[in-house]
Amino acid sequence: MGIDPRQMSPAARLEHLLELGDGNCAWCGFDLSKPNARPTRDHIVPKVKGGPTRLENEVASCGSCNGKRGNDSPSQYIESSRRDRGLDPNAELVADQLDRLNDAIARDGGMRKIRDYVTREAKRVRELIEPAR
Ligand SMILES: [Zn+2]
């Protein structure tokens, strides 16, 4: 990325996250380019758990999933979305973002409060990726 992500406008951040997720909600797969879509930036590690507002900790999400998820961990929400709503969350994207967040922690330091959470969730979400059919 050419510019410091922290200098990006909210619109540019959302644009980047939409590209990363192929234009779909990370949790339910809804096409966020549709006129009735409400694309949002969802924190993978929730803010109340200490999750930072940085690109590695965000995915594009529809407003509905962002609200429904609340403070569920990413692995919990992937499991309950599959089990209770028959959805097909993009576990691979979430796992990739958690790996990027882990790299950012190793590179930049800090974020002590979330280190264990990120390591644990990266592993759990990775285990939830369905084998290619
Ligand atoms: Zn959704």
Image: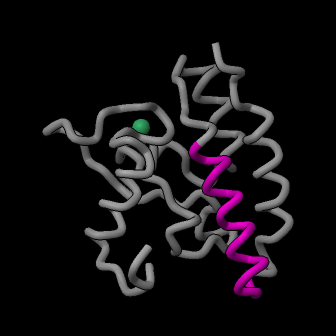
Which picture quadrant has residue 129? top right
Using the image as rendered, state which of residue 44 and residue 130 is in the foreground. Answer: 130
Of the pair 11 and 113, the residue shown nearer to us: 11
- Identity of the residue drawn at 67% across and 47% down: 95
Looking at the image, residue 128 lies above or below residue 96: above
Q: Is residue 103 left or right of residue 112?
A: left
Give percent across and percent down for residue 119: 83, 59
Residue in the picture at 70% in, 40% down: 76
Residue 43 picture location, percent across and down: 54, 61
Q: Quadrant of residue 6?
A: bottom left
Query: What is the chief secondary structure element of the magenta stretch?
Result: helix
Give the residue at the far left of this rendering.
35
x, y percent for residue 34: 19, 36
State the extent of the magenta-drawn residues as a range: 93-110
> How many badges with numbers are in the image?
0
Q: Quadrant of the C terminus?
A: top right
Q: Is residue 48 above or below residue 123?
A: below
Report ligand 1 position as a quadrant.
top left
- In this rendering, is residue 25 above or below 97? above
Give yes or no for residue 119 being in the magenta stretch: no
Please report the residue visible at 36 percent of the width from the left and 68 percent of the height from the top. Answer: 13
Q: Is residue 14 left or right of residue 33?
A: right
Residue 106, position as x, y percentages in the image: 78, 78
